[in-house]
Amino acid sequence: MTDLTLPSITLVRPSLEWLSAYEDALARGWSPNTDQDVSREQLRQLRRDPVRFLHNLYNSPTVRLPDGRDVPRLPAHDFWISDGDFCGRIGFRFQRGTEDLPRTAYGHIGYTIVPWKQRRGYATEALRRILPLARAEGFSRVLITCDDDNEGSRKVILANGGTPAGMTPHDRRPGHWKLGFWVPTPEL
């Protein structure tokens, strides 16, 4: 018989209390960015000044794109995923009053799970838990994207009610696509 129990996870706000667990994940090679490996650079910055690193990670007025450009940071709700240990991150970014996003953002929600916790339902459950927050911000649906060859992420999105919303060429992987899905947010 298959165990269909959902993982027992919580979404925690990034904090100094959890920073050593985040550091450990970086040291083990996990990258919080799914389009480029930023683990070594983040680890260097974190070890130089942990308080400043944490502040800049989510409160800087700009974000640096893979091409080196700095663009204004969108309003966002960012969380670290925990089952008692650090499991990854999930975030919801948006522009107030519109479903539209700037060209520099593929979708409203991004997530990544540390490799040693993958395939346990953590991303599916984390996405399920952040959707009410998107509804509270006025969104009846959110756009989520994944790489065309990321079957795991596609399953996470579909398990949360995702319906196809088209595809766009991948900016960092020539010959690949970002698949878009609209995911409904639950009624409050």
Image (cartoon, helix red, strand yellow):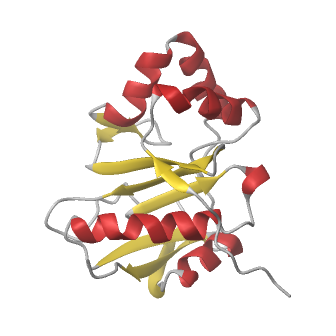
In the picture, the quarter occupied by the N terminus is bottom right
- In-front residue for pair 67/7: 7
- Counting from the top left corner in percent of width and height, residue 59 is at 32, 33
Q: Residue at x 37, y 58 (%)?
A: 92
- Counting from the top left corner in percent of width and height, residue 23 is at 63, 28
- The single residue placed furthest to the left in the displayed view is 97
Q: Residue at x 78, y 79 (%)?
A: 3
In the picture, the quarter occupied by the C terminus is bottom left
Q: Residue at x 73, y 66 (%)?
A: 120
Quarter of the figure with residue 73: top left
- Counting from the top left corner in percent of width and height, residue 158 is at 56, 83
Side (left or right) of 39 relative to 178: right
| Residue 172 in sight | no
Q: Is residue 126 above or below residue 168?
A: above
Side (left or right) of 39 relative to 15: right
- Counting from the top left corner in percent of width and height, residue 186 is at 34, 80
Q: Is residue 55 above or below residue 63?
A: above
Number of marks? 0
Quarter of the figure with residue 187: bottom left
Q: Is residue 2 above or below residue 117?
A: below
Q: Is residue 161 above or below residue 178?
A: below
| Residue 178 in sight | yes
- The single residue placed furthest to the top in the displayed view is 48
Q: Residue at x 58, y 70 (%)?
A: 124
Quarter of the figure with residue 28: top right
